[in-house]
Image (cartoon, helix red, strand yellow):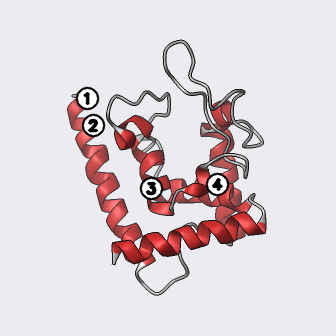
Amino acid sequence: MKKIYCAAAAVATLGFGGFAWAQMNAGQSPGILPYDEPARVANGATIYAENCAACHGADLEGQPNWKDRDAAGYLPAPPHDETGHTWHHDDILLVRITALGTEAIVGGGYKSNMMGFAEVLSADEILDVLAYIKSTWPPQVVETHNQINARAQVFRN
Protein backbone atom coordinates (compact mmCIF):
# COMPACT_ATOMS: atom_id res chain seq x y z
CA MET A 1 0.00 0.00 0.00
CA LYS A 2 2.86 2.39 0.82
CA LYS A 3 4.30 1.89 -2.68
CA ILE A 4 0.95 2.93 -4.16
CA TYR A 5 0.95 6.15 -2.14
CA CYS A 6 4.56 6.87 -3.09
CA ALA A 7 3.82 6.23 -6.76
CA ALA A 8 0.73 8.43 -6.60
CA ALA A 9 2.72 11.20 -4.95
CA ALA A 10 5.44 10.92 -7.59
CA VAL A 11 2.91 11.05 -10.43
CA ALA A 12 1.15 14.01 -8.84
CA THR A 13 4.44 15.82 -8.37
CA LEU A 14 5.62 15.08 -11.88
CA GLY A 15 2.30 16.36 -13.18
CA PHE A 16 2.67 19.46 -11.06
CA GLY A 17 6.27 19.83 -12.17
CA GLY A 18 5.07 19.84 -15.78
CA PHE A 19 2.55 22.52 -14.90
CA ALA A 20 5.24 24.54 -13.14
CA TRP A 21 7.65 24.12 -16.05
CA ALA A 22 4.94 25.31 -18.45
CA GLN A 23 4.29 28.37 -16.27
CA MET A 24 7.99 29.25 -16.24
CA ASN A 25 8.05 28.98 -20.02
CA ALA A 26 4.89 30.99 -20.67
CA GLY A 27 6.70 34.34 -20.86
CA GLN A 28 6.05 35.20 -17.22
CA SER A 29 8.68 36.54 -14.87
CA PRO A 30 11.28 34.01 -13.72
CA GLY A 31 9.82 31.53 -11.31
CA ILE A 32 6.39 30.33 -10.36
CA LEU A 33 5.96 31.52 -6.78
CA PRO A 34 3.20 34.11 -6.34
CA TYR A 35 5.21 36.05 -3.73
CA ASP A 36 3.81 39.36 -4.97
CA GLU A 37 0.15 38.31 -4.51
CA PRO A 38 -0.96 39.32 -0.98
CA ALA A 39 -3.84 36.83 -0.72
CA ARG A 40 -1.63 33.90 -1.75
CA VAL A 41 1.13 35.02 0.64
CA ALA A 42 -1.37 35.33 3.51
CA ASN A 43 -2.71 31.86 2.75
CA GLY A 44 0.86 30.55 2.65
CA ALA A 45 1.61 32.11 6.05
CA THR A 46 -1.36 30.28 7.56
CA ILE A 47 -0.41 26.96 5.97
CA TYR A 48 3.23 27.44 7.01
CA ALA A 49 2.18 28.04 10.63
CA GLU A 50 0.08 24.85 10.59
CA ASN A 51 2.51 22.54 8.76
CA CYS A 52 6.05 23.89 8.79
CA ALA A 53 6.69 26.15 11.78
CA ALA A 54 7.02 23.28 14.26
CA CYS A 55 10.33 22.35 12.60
CA HIS A 56 11.42 25.42 10.64
CA GLY A 57 10.38 27.97 13.29
CA ALA A 58 7.55 30.46 13.54
CA ASP A 59 9.89 33.17 12.26
CA LEU A 60 11.52 30.95 9.58
CA GLU A 61 14.62 30.74 11.81
CA GLY A 62 15.12 26.96 11.61
CA GLN A 63 16.46 24.76 14.37
CA PRO A 64 19.65 25.50 16.31
CA ASN A 65 22.87 24.15 14.82
CA TRP A 66 21.08 23.37 11.57
CA LYS A 67 24.36 22.74 9.74
CA ASP A 68 25.51 20.02 12.17
CA ARG A 69 24.24 16.43 11.93
CA ASP A 70 22.85 14.85 15.07
CA ALA A 71 24.01 11.48 16.48
CA ALA A 72 21.67 9.63 14.07
CA GLY A 73 23.06 11.49 11.04
CA TYR A 74 20.15 13.88 10.49
CA LEU A 75 20.50 17.60 9.92
CA PRO A 76 18.15 19.83 11.91
CA ALA A 77 15.56 21.82 9.96
CA PRO A 78 17.26 24.74 8.20
CA PRO A 79 16.00 28.31 8.31
CA HIS A 80 13.90 29.60 5.45
CA ASP A 81 14.83 33.23 6.07
CA GLU A 82 17.72 34.90 4.27
CA THR A 83 20.27 33.21 6.56
CA GLY A 84 19.41 29.76 5.21
CA HIS A 85 19.90 28.20 1.83
CA THR A 86 16.30 27.96 0.60
CA TRP A 87 16.83 30.88 -1.77
CA HIS A 88 19.80 29.10 -3.35
CA HIS A 89 17.40 26.66 -5.06
CA ASP A 90 15.13 27.40 -8.03
CA ASP A 91 11.37 27.23 -7.63
CA ILE A 92 10.95 23.83 -9.28
CA LEU A 93 13.45 22.22 -6.93
CA LEU A 94 11.80 23.87 -3.93
CA VAL A 95 8.42 22.51 -5.03
CA ARG A 96 9.88 19.02 -5.53
CA ILE A 97 11.56 19.04 -2.10
CA THR A 98 8.34 20.22 -0.46
CA ALA A 99 6.17 17.72 -2.31
CA LEU A 100 8.39 14.63 -2.15
CA GLY A 101 10.68 15.25 0.83
CA THR A 102 14.41 15.83 0.93
CA GLU A 103 15.47 12.17 1.04
CA ALA A 104 13.53 11.41 -2.15
CA ILE A 105 15.14 14.30 -4.01
CA VAL A 106 18.73 14.02 -2.76
CA GLY A 107 18.89 10.22 -2.70
CA GLY A 108 22.13 8.34 -2.14
CA GLY A 109 21.31 7.48 1.47
CA TYR A 110 20.86 11.13 2.47
CA LYS A 111 19.03 11.31 5.81
CA SER A 112 16.34 13.90 6.44
CA ASN A 113 13.35 14.34 8.68
CA MET A 114 11.70 16.45 5.95
CA MET A 115 8.71 14.48 4.76
CA GLY A 116 6.97 15.06 1.48
CA PHE A 117 3.76 17.07 1.59
CA ALA A 118 2.19 15.99 -1.73
CA GLU A 119 -0.37 13.92 0.17
CA VAL A 120 -1.05 16.74 2.66
CA LEU A 121 -1.06 19.96 0.63
CA SER A 122 -2.36 20.79 -2.83
CA ALA A 123 -0.05 22.17 -5.50
CA ASP A 124 -1.47 25.66 -4.93
CA GLU A 125 -0.94 25.35 -1.16
CA ILE A 126 2.70 24.35 -1.69
CA LEU A 127 3.17 27.35 -4.00
CA ASP A 128 1.52 29.61 -1.43
CA VAL A 129 3.80 28.41 1.39
CA LEU A 130 6.87 28.94 -0.76
CA ALA A 131 5.52 32.34 -1.85
CA TYR A 132 5.11 33.33 1.80
CA ILE A 133 8.68 32.28 2.54
CA LYS A 134 10.05 34.22 -0.46
CA SER A 135 7.97 37.29 0.45
CA THR A 136 9.95 37.63 3.70
CA TRP A 137 13.37 37.82 2.05
CA PRO A 138 15.16 41.16 1.61
CA PRO A 139 14.93 42.67 -1.91
CA GLN A 140 18.51 41.72 -2.83
CA VAL A 141 17.85 38.06 -1.92
CA VAL A 142 14.60 38.08 -3.93
CA GLU A 143 16.49 39.49 -6.91
CA THR A 144 19.21 36.85 -6.59
CA HIS A 145 16.54 34.13 -6.36
CA ASN A 146 14.84 35.51 -9.47
CA GLN A 147 18.18 35.30 -11.27
CA ILE A 148 18.55 31.67 -10.13
CA ASN A 149 15.10 30.97 -11.56
CA ALA A 150 16.00 32.68 -14.83
CA ARG A 151 19.15 30.55 -15.16
CA ALA A 152 17.19 27.38 -14.35
CA GLN A 153 14.61 28.33 -16.96
CA VAL A 154 17.32 28.63 -19.62
CA PHE A 155 18.50 25.11 -18.82
CA ARG A 156 14.96 23.75 -19.04
CA ASN A 157 14.39 25.20 -22.52
Tag 4 or tag 2, which sits nearer the N-term?
Answer: 2
Secondary structure beneath label 1: helix
Crowdedness of circle 2 by 10 Å Cα count: few (<14), some, many (20+)? few
Q: From the viewer's side, name the closer residue of 22 and 65.
A: 65
Q: Residue at x 54, y 12 (%)?
A: 71
Q: At label 3, which amino acid type do we have? A: Leu
Q: Locate residue 143: give its quadrant.
A: bottom right
Q: CA distance from mark 4 to mark 1?
A: 28 Å
Residue 90 circle label = none
Q: CA distance from mark 2 to mark 1?
A: 5 Å
Q: Which residue is mark 3?
A: 93
Query: Vertical placement of 115 versus 21: above or below?
Result: above
Crowdedness of circle 3 by 10 Å Cα count: few (<14), some, many (20+)? some
Q: CA distance from mark 2 to mark 4?
A: 25 Å
Pointers 2 and 1 in contact (C-beta within 8 Å): yes
Q: Would you say residue 63 is visible in this rendering?
A: yes
Q: At label 4, which amino acid type do we have? A: Gly
The picture places residue 59, in percent across and down from the top left corner, at 78, 42
Q: Which residue is mark 1?
A: 2
Q: Which residue is mark 2?
A: 5
Q: CA distance from mark 3 to mark 2?
A: 21 Å
- Of circles 1 and 3, the one toward us is 3
Q: Quadrant of the N terminus?
A: top left
Q: From the viewer's side, name the closer residue of 140 and 124.
A: 140
- Of circles 3 and 2, the one toward us is 3
Q: Locate residue 138: give its quadrant.
A: bottom right
Q: Locate residue 51: give its quadrant.
A: top right
Pointers 3 and 2 in contact (C-beta within 8 Å): no
Q: Which residue is mark 4?
A: 44
